[in-house]
Image (spheres, helix red, strand yellow):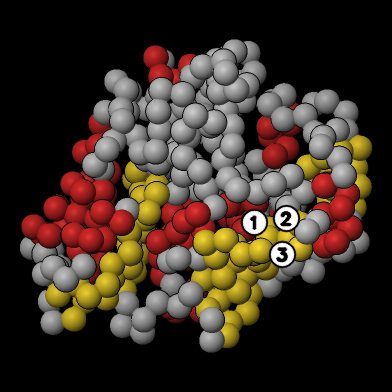
Amino acid sequence: MLPFEYARAADVDEAVNLLAGDPSASYLAGGTTQLDLMKDGVLGPERLVDITRLPLRGVTRDGDGLHIGALTTMEELAADPTVTDELRIVRQALLLGASTQLRNMATIGGNLLQRARCRYFRDPSVPDCNKREPGTGCAAVNNTARMHAILGVSERCIAVHASDLAVALVALDAVVHLKGTSGGRSVPLTQFYREAGSSPDVENVLVHGELITAITIPFLPPTAVSGYLKVRDRASYEFALASAGVALVVQDGTINQARVGLGGVGSKPWRSLEAEQVLTGSPAGEETFREAAAAAVQGAWTVSGTAFKVELAQRTLVRTLRTVSGVTS
């Protein structure tokens, strides 16, 4: 690990100013991903601005939804009564997203900003990584890529976004609240992330110095049902091969509202509007679920190692729709 300067911010304004005035600085919160990347030589900030003591922790609710301070831990959010009782999709994504030890340390803001789990991105001895070194290529395209993405990717980068929670939150139309030197702004999470495109190193709309201060989750209709399914290689802590977060409102056998998020397959937490269009207004049943799953993977771009994910993602979504709706035929 390279040497770095440490600073502790006393309030949000000081944190933003410390970072905005130093291009080589980075925030430090739970550190569960960042410190690993620093030890591996992938990241080398010259200054870490510790924000762990800022007043950005806690969960409240009002008429607009559930408000979550960015420094709230994953475990704290999973245990919140509203999440337990009304947002099953969020609770399941949190519990499946990390071990208990990690959930007690990792913050919600940090979870949304976790970096790619691409083995080539995380190995500085591999020279070809457009996400780490723009213009160098993508080593994953022609090598082992079983864990990589098939949606929102290109030959420039096929790294997958690793957050389970973010998949649930994009499905729920969550909003992130940001603070920078020019003030605050709020961004729908569906517009926060960027696809790999021509600049895989630019992963979101944050400008240097901006800080995630909170997340708002609008409430689902009282009759909505939801859930999150994660398919992985082992039942213990592991990243998704494919996952699906679904929220439905079903009345008299017809799907009146549908929210669909996919994980383990996208360069960003994937909201499938195509699947939602198929589901909305259709009878809740196997045929509808399969049509929606097929629509969800339209435009998939695969390499030899990721081709299996087209079928896996569909099966994962169909199974989630069955489970959430309670309709199995």
Q: Amino acid type of disc 3?
A: Gly
312 or 300, which lies in front? 300
Above or below residue 319? Residue 248 is below
Name which of mark 3 and mark 1 comes first in the sequence.
Answer: 1
Q: Are marks 3 and 1 in contact (CB under 8 Å)?
A: no
- Which element type, helix, strand or loop, lies under badge 1? helix
* Element marked by disc 2: strand
Callout in the foreground (2, 3)? 3
Between 26 and 77, the residue placed more toward the observer is 26
Identify which residue is drawn at 51% across, 71% down: 217
Residue 36: x %, y % from top left: 69, 34
Q: Given the image, on which type of amino acid does mark 2 rest?
A: Leu
**What's the residue type where badge 1 is placed?**
Gly
In the picture provided, is 273 more to the left or to the right than 120? left
Q: Residue furthest front?
A: 182
Residue 109: numbered disc: 1
> CA separation, marks 2 and 3?
9 Å
Mark before the other along the chain sequence, 2 or 3: 3
Q: Position of residue 111 (x, y in %)?
A: 59, 51
Quarter that holds the N terminus: top right
Residue 102 makes an appearance in the image: no
Q: Are marks 1 and 2 in contact (CB under 8 Å)?
A: yes
Residue 3, picture quadrant: top right
> In the picture provided, is 225 more to the left or to the right than 198?
left
Marks 1 and 2, how far apart in space? 9 Å
Judged left or right of residue 135, residue 279 is: left
What residue is pinned by disc 2? Answer: 211
Q: Compute the Cα span from label 3 to label 1.
A: 16 Å
**Residue 121: mark in rendering:** none
Q: How many marks?
A: 3
State the image coordinates of residue 25 (x, y, percent, origin top left): 82, 39
Q: Which residue is mark 3?
A: 184
